[in-house]
Amino acid sequence: MGEAVDLCEVYRKHEDVFNAFGELREYAAEKVLFREGEMEADDAYLILGGTIRVSRQVRSKEKELAVLGAGEIVGEVALFSGGPRTATARCIEEARVLRLTRRSFEKLRSSRLDVAYELLEGILGIVTQRLRRTIDRLEVIYFWLT
């Protein structure tokens, strides 16, 4: 499980299945997918094309957390845990995404466990890479503060 899976590969492999359970969307540059603090969020976006900037308000300034591209996912926290959005996602350029809601994911899991498992494995790989980068950054900060 060391290397993250390209979710575009998973999508292409099971395109008909994903299109039956998810919703393909296209967004123009600068379009906001979701905003930090939005309540009752329950969906995530598999990025099939384009780039998306993820940011958060810190001391009244917008702080870039990541720039994500094809093969990645954004909004996965809401897909699995609900609650308010933890960040804002804005398209840097035109983007093509597959929107999955918690309900559509549960339906996918019920009818195509094999595909749901492959998707989860890919998401887990991506989240694990992000967590490792965050830990590395925290170590640097801790080093400079102590």
Image (tube, rainbow, N blue to C red):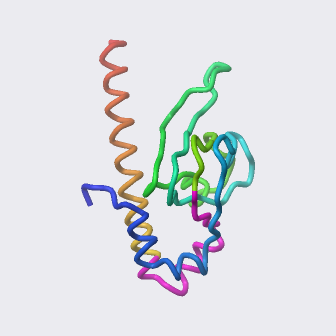
Q: Is residue 59 above or below residue 76?
A: above
Locate the N terminus by quadrant.
Answer: bottom left
Task: Judge by depth and name the residue closer to the eye, 11 or 44.
Answer: 11
Measuring from the top left, give residue 141's x and y in whole percent: 37, 20
Measuring from the top left, give residue 39's x and y in whole percent: 75, 49
Measuring from the top left, give residue 73's x and y in whole percent: 50, 55
Locate the C terminus by quadrant.
Answer: top left
Q: Is residue 79 above or below residue 92?
A: below
Task: Judge by depth and name the residue closer to the eye, 139 or 97.
Answer: 97
**The residue positioned farthest toward the bottom in the image shown:** 111
Q: Residue at x 51, y 46 (%)?
A: 51
Look at the image and say whether residue 106 sits in the magenta stretch: yes
Residue 38 picture quarter: top right
Q: In this view, does 110 lie above or below 146?
A: below
Task: Left or right? Give the position of 35 relative to 134.
Answer: right
Which residue range is magenta in the image?
96-115
Measuring from the top left, give residue 13's x and y in whole percent: 40, 77
Q: Main secondary structure of the magenta part?
A: helix
Task: Left or right? Give the position of 95 relative to 135.
Answer: right
Residue 52 picture quarter: top right
